[in-house]
């Protein structure tokens, strides 16, 4: 994908050379500085009932007279926000993507300023419109023709737009990596494969990557992580990936991603309906690798560490059983009452491992609970932290990246249900408040640094006809990490 900007004022679209011109408008089209040729078309279409300036509406013209571009799409936005701009661009690109246009120039038809955020929103919408999974589907159509995207702006806006396009292009690369890895089936995307992918990413993007095997993980004493891994023939891996962009003395940000390459539930086995979607249970790990990739591309002055515990959760003669008690790396013991609550069992050891980096903040990302999907649906990821400042920073990153999160409670009182008669804690509580008790479990391993947990069970992938990974929350994480640049 190729992203550029072009300087031209909105009033002079006639000369913009692209296969297609995509004009985003809202409010009264006649009021702004819209090119008279386009304004005339819009007014006429509205007058004849063929178009309405309402969110989601689009108008297509082939070889419009008076314009250099062979195609004109007018897309209506609900309001002047960047979010509305992004969905209007998405509608417009949706209309164009099946056709013959290779390049598209996007114009804000109303007279607001073109910002860095508009530029980044364009890259995100473009990536969404053109992503196609084909790794294990040879019959999939060829790459989409749409590949060159230009944002038209004024001279004064060019610097901001350029910066937004550069950041957006990096985020998009990270999102696409995360999507591709998450979409890859469990028999392809094994823990070993994730480790190799991390190594390759390191080589290509200048990251230091270490991949620990079962023996090394045993030596560390990650008894909880290994307990989950023991039911599978697939060997577990613990991935440590570092981006060093600042002095060694600068404390790193640490991201920890859940890397269950397939979650059957183990002996507490899941129902078979939609169990295929549990290949996405490494979405947290994929988002950490995607973020590392985006950050490595942008080279900010900061240090970043990605930690990924990865294994399968399988039932077998070697598998953990309900009631088993294991010893975590922290020394705390855990009674495994439900083998399907495995994410927290692998994350807790990675969270203890994170202490050695003396991090300025640790964020874990996990497809952790069905309860989070019940609470928030598929729009917001769940944000859990007792640290208001960290919450503010993550929420600001979320807004800037158009990658929504919603903060959930984490009161001390929720911890009560994790009490066990046979270990320091149980790995599950009752159904009620399940997303919160999962976070409370993790919290018991995070006393030595500032910490937040992001539950992406509802946002990492889509079900149904459009089944596929979303690449979330790479945009949020990239913005969050970049906010630490010195
Ligand atoms: N990977 C699942 C969480 C999940 C379920 C994500 C459905 C997306 C959709 C996780 O390992 C799990 O199985 N969690 C259990 C926890 C329970 C046993 C306390 C759950 O949510 O049912
Ligand atoms: Mn599970
Ligand atoms: Zn899981």
Image (spheres, rainbow, N blue to C red):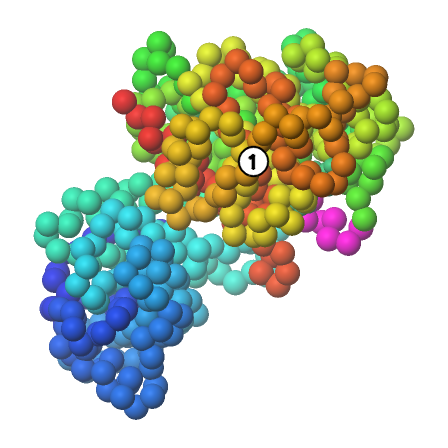
Residue at the spot of label 1 = 409
Q: Is residue 236 visible?
A: no
Q: Is residue 389 left or right of residue 370?
A: left
Q: Is residue 23 magenta?
A: no
Q: Position of residue 447 (x, y in %)?
A: 56, 16
What's the residue at 15%, 50% (across, down)?
157
Front residue of this view, candidates 324 and 201: 324
Q: Position of residue 384 (x, y in %)?
A: 54, 33
Q: Residue at x 64, y 38 (%)?
A: 435
In front: 369, or 260? 369
- Report x, y in % for residue 36: 13, 77
Residue 230's spot in the image, x, y percent? 78, 24
Quadrant of residue 189 within the rendered picture: top right
Is 322 or 372 nearer to us in this picture?
Answer: 372
Whether residue 274 is in magenta: the answer is yes
Which residue does the image show at 55% across and 38% down from the upper left?
408
Crowdedness of circle 1 by 10 Å Cα count: few (<14), some, many (20+)? some
Image quadrant of residue 445? Answer: top right
Look at the image and tell me whether residue 247 can be seen: yes
Residue shown at 39% from the left, 48% from the top: 402
Left or right: 265, with 286 as reference point: right
Magenta region, residue range: 272-278
């Amino acid at each position: 994908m190729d992203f550029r900007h072009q300087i031209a004022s909105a009033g002079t679209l006639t000369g913009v050379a692209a296969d297609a011109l995509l004009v985003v408008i809202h409010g009264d089209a006649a009021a702004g500085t819209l090119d008279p040729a386009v304004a005339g078309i819009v007014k006429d279409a509205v007058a004849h009932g063929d178009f309405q300036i309402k969110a989601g509406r689009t108008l297509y013209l082939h070889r419009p007279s008076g314009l250099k571009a062979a195609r004109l799409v007018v897309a209506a936005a609900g309001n002047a926000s960047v979010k509305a701009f992004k969905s209007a661009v998405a509608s417009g690109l949706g209309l164009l993507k099946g056709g013959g246009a290779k390049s598209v120039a996007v114009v804000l038809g109303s007279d607001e300023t073109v910002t860095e955020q508009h530029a980044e929103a364009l890259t995100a919408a473009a990536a969404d419109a053109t992503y196609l999974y084909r790794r294990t589907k040879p019959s999939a159509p060829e790459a989409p023709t749409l590949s060159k995207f230009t944002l038209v702006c004024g001279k004064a806006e060019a610097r901001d737009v350029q910066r937004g396009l550069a950041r957006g292009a990096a985020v998009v690369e990270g999102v696409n990596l995360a999507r591709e890895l998450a979409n890859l089936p469990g028999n392809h995307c094994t823990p070993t494969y994730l480790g190799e992918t991390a190594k390759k990413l390191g080589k290509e993007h200048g990251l230091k990557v270490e991949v620990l095997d079962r023996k090394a993980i045993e030596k560390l004493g990650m008894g909880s992580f290994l307990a989950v891994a023991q039911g599978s023939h697939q060997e577990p891996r613990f991935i440590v990936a570092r981006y060093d962009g600042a002095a060694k003395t600068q404390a790193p940000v640490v991201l920890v991603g859940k890397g269950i390459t397939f979650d059957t539930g183990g002996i507490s086995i899941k129902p078979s309906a939609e169990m295929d979607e549990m290949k996405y249970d490494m979405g947290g790990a994929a988002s950490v690798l995607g973020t590392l990739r985006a950050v490595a591309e942008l080279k900010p002055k900061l240090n970043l560490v990605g930690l990924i515990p990865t294994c399968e959760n399988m039932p077998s003669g070697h598998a953990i059983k309900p009631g088993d008690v294991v010893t975590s790396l922290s020394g705390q013991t855990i009674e495994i009452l439900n083998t399907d609550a495995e994410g927290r069992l692998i994350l807790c050891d990675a969270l203890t491992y994170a202490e050695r980096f003396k991090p300025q903040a640790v964020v874990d990302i996990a497809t952790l609970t069905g309860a989070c999907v019940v609470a928030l649906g598929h729009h917001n990821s769940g944000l859990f932290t007792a640290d208001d400042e960290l919450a503010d920073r993550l929420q600001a990153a979320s807004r800037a990246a158009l990658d929504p999160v919603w903060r959930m409670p984490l009161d001390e009182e929720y911890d009560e249900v994790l009490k066990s008669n046979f270990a320091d804690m149980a790995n599950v509580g009752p159904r009620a408040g399940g997303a919160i008790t999962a976070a409370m479990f993790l919290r018991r391993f995070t006393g030595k640094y500032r910490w937040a947990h992001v539950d992406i069970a509802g946002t990492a992938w889509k079900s149904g006809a459009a089944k596929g990974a979303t690449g979330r929350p790479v945009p949020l994480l990239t913005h969050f990490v970049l906010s630490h640049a010195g």
